[in-house]
Image (cartoon, rainbow, N blue to C red):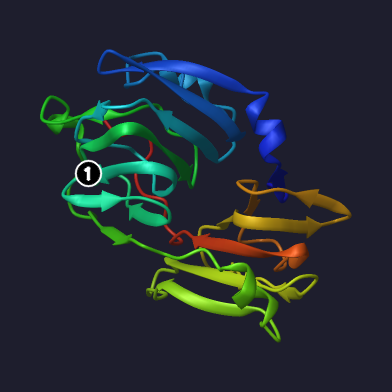
Amino acid sequence: MLMLIATSTAEAMQNQRRVTVNGRDYILSEYVGAAPLRGQYVDGNETNDNGLPQGFLVDQPPGAITLPHFHETNQFQVFVEGVGSMGKHRARPLTVQYANGHTPYGPITASETGVKYFTLRQRWDPGAKYMPGARELLANGNQRTRLKADIAITVTADRASLASPLTETIFQREDDGLAAWIVRFGAGQEADMPDAAGTGGQYLLVADGELLLSGKAFEKWSTVFVTADEAPPRIAAGDKGLDLLVLQFPKQPGPRHAT
């Protein structure tokens, strides 16, 4: 059984790699598990599978385009800096997108300033399968996407006025457990996270402020992965408050290494 995995931004920035996507170099910062070795699936990518979920921050350079593709596993993507687009939708902080495994999406296009976004997967994935060339690898019948844009970061004055943590729904919980929330904390406030039992686990992402957990401080863009077997962690905010995304996966992760 996996135990709670907490990664600070400083730790992730020490584990970066470059991958080539459509002729451009992207920088991936590893948070959970192992980031992809390449910008697309090729035979042999499975050797990088370490049995963990997969979460990393993507720094997509100015003007770069990630062509339409799909992955084998369920994932959230969170746009945290810069401006881009996800398909026909503008993507800027904070934009949250969810896609089931084997659901084509994109293109992801960076503006002239570039764009940064988290890719947070329920389990390890062997790499992007680009459409239409990979159509024969696509398992039909369980496609699903959700997208919410323009999620505001709490301004300092509003955070100071919070009497207790405030939870706002991003995606309403669905029958299989898929859901997402943002929890807004004032300075020093505490709260238990939603229970992940009966789901595919959760990522907690520090969108702003500071998270305190088990005697350690986690800065902006830090992540925590919570399995469905774990009791809901009790989260405390630092002295500047906290905006925390809770991104919950459906119970069923979908096909694995489908051919």
The answer to which quarter of the image holds residue 132 is: top left
Q: Which residue is mark 1?
A: 105
Q: Is residue 151 left or right of residue 160?
A: left
Is residue 251 placed above or below 40 in the rendered structure? below
User: Relative to the observer, which residue lies in front, 228 or 95?
Assistant: 95
Q: Is residue 192 visible?
A: yes
Mark 1: few, some, or many residues within 10 Å (few <14, many ≥20)? some
Which residue, as the protein is rendered here, is positioned at the far left?
132
Query: Which residue is pictured at 50% across the width and 26% down the height?
Result: 28
| Number of dots carrying numbers | 1
Q: Is residue 33 visible?
A: no
Instruction: Work out which quarter of the rendered image holds the C terminus and state it.
Output: top left
Residue 236 placed where, x, y %?
A: 77, 67
User: Relative to the observer, which residue lies in front, 141 or 84?
Assistant: 84
Which residue, as the protein is rendered here, is positioned at the far bottom?
163
Residue 50 placed where, x, y %?
A: 59, 28
Amino acid marked by disc 1: Tyr
Which residue, as the protein is rendered here, is positioned at the far right?
215
The answer to which quarter of the image holds residue 58 is: top left
Query: Which residue is pictured at 68% across the width and 47% down the height?
Result: 2
Residue 47 placed where, x, y %?
A: 50, 17
Is residue 113 placed above or below 211 in the rendered structure? above
Q: Is residue 236 left or right of residue 107?
A: right
Residue 201 placed where, x, y %?
A: 56, 58
User: Relative to the observer, which residue lies in front, 122 or 8?
Assistant: 8
Query: Which residue is pictured at 24% across the width and 47% down the height?
Result: 103
Is residue 137 placed above or below 245 in the rendered structure? above
Q: Is residue 136 left or right of residue 257?
A: left
Q: Secondary structure at mark 1?
A: loop
